[in-house]
Image (cartoon, grey):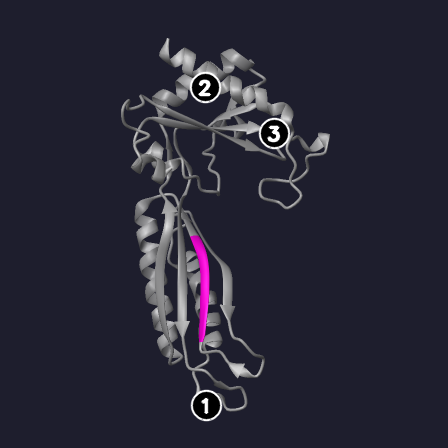
Amino acid sequence: SADMIQNGILKDPKPDAAMMLHVTAGLPLPAGTVIVSSPGVSAPAADYFTIKVQGKGCHGSAPQNGVDSITAAAHILIALQEIHARELASTEEAVLTIGTFHGGTAENVIADSVTMGGTIRTYDEKTRAFLKERMTDISRGIASAFRATAEVSFGSGCPTLVNDKTFGDLVAGYMTELFGQNGAFTTAQLSGGKPSRGGGSEDFAYISQEVPAVMLALAAGEPKNGHNYPQHHPKVTFDEEALPYGCAAFVWTAFQYLC
C-alpha cells in the first residue's frame, strides 16, 4: 500500500473512502459471512527489525581468546522479553517476536557474529517508540557486558489500521441490507461488545491513515466442513464458495455509497 500511495493511488481522483476485505479460514461461521470491523484500531502497527551481535571468533578449545557472540545474543533474546513483562503496563498491548537466529559456521569454533530478526506489533505510537528505544538500549548494554557489540536496525513495517466510525457504520448497514442479520456482523457483535483486535498487521493501514476506511473479514472455511486450520497454517484450506459474497460486498458498498 505504501508503494501504491507513492505512485498516486490516492490522487486524481482522491477517493472519498476506502474498504478492504480479508478472507479468513477456520471461523465457525458459514462461508460468505461478512464481519465489519468496529470503529478504532483493528490491526497493530508492525515493525521488522534486525539485531547484529559482533564478537570475536576463535577455536572452541580456547574461549578465552575470543568473544562468544552466540552467548551474548542468547542473553539479549531472553532479556528482550522482559520489556513486555516488566516495563509495559497491562493496558499497553504489544508483541515482540524473534523469528530468526543465525550464527556460527562450525561446531568447534566460537562464532564471531550472530544476526537475529523479528517483529514488534503495537497499537499506539507511544508504545511503538518506547519498544524501539528499549530494544536498542538492552541489546547494546547486554552485548557490552559480554565484551561484544550490538546494533539494532528497523526496516519496513506499517502503522496501525484505523477504522472510521462514520464510514464503518454505513458499511455495516450496507452489509446487513445485502446479506441479512445472520450473514453480516460487526466485530463488536461477535465479541459481546468488547474491543476486538487482530494480532496480525495489514498494510492497508497506510491507506486508513489517509482517508476514511474500514476493514472487512470474509468467512472462507468452516471447521465443520473440513476447514480446520487458521490463516498461515501450512494445512489451511479455503472454501471458494465465499468468493461471490466478497465480490458482492465490494460492489454493493460502492453503489450504495456513491448513489
**Kind of residue sitting beneath label 2:** Ala
* Percent of width and height locating residue 241: 64, 23
Q: Residues within 10 Å of mark 2 (few under 14, many from 20)?
A: many
**Magenta residues, start to end:** 113-119
Q: Nearer the viewer, mark 1 or mark 2?
A: 1
Q: Answer with the quarter of the image where residue 221 lies.
A: top right
Percent coordinates x, y for residue 203 in the rendering: 41, 39
Instruction: State whether residue 217 is above or below residue 201.
Output: above
Going 37% across and 50% down the picture, which residue do you hit? 156
Question: Which quadrant, please, contains the N terminus?
Answer: top left
Residue 178 position in % (x across, y down): 52, 12
Q: Which residue is mark 2?
A: 172
Q: Earlier in the sequence, mark 1 or mark 2?
A: 1
* Quarter residue 2 falls in: top left
Label 1 to label 2: alpha-carbon separation: 66 Å
Which dot marks residue 220?
A: 3
Amino acid type, mark 1: Gln
Instruction: State left or right for residue 27 relative to residue 187.
Output: right
Per the image, label 2 sits on a secondary structure element best described as helix
Residue shown at 57% from the left, 18% from the top:
183
Element at label 3 = loop
Q: Are marks 1 and 2 in contact (CB under 8 Å)?
A: no
Label 1, on which residue?
Answer: 64
Magenta span has 77? Answer: no
Is residue 38 at all visible to an observer of this figure? no
Whether 141 is drawn above or below 235: the answer is below
At horizontal 44% and vertical 90% (from top left) the residue drawn is 65
Q: Within 10 Å of the Cα at label 1, are there few (<14), some (14-19), or many (20+) other Cα atoms? A: few
The amino acid sitting under disc 3 is Ala
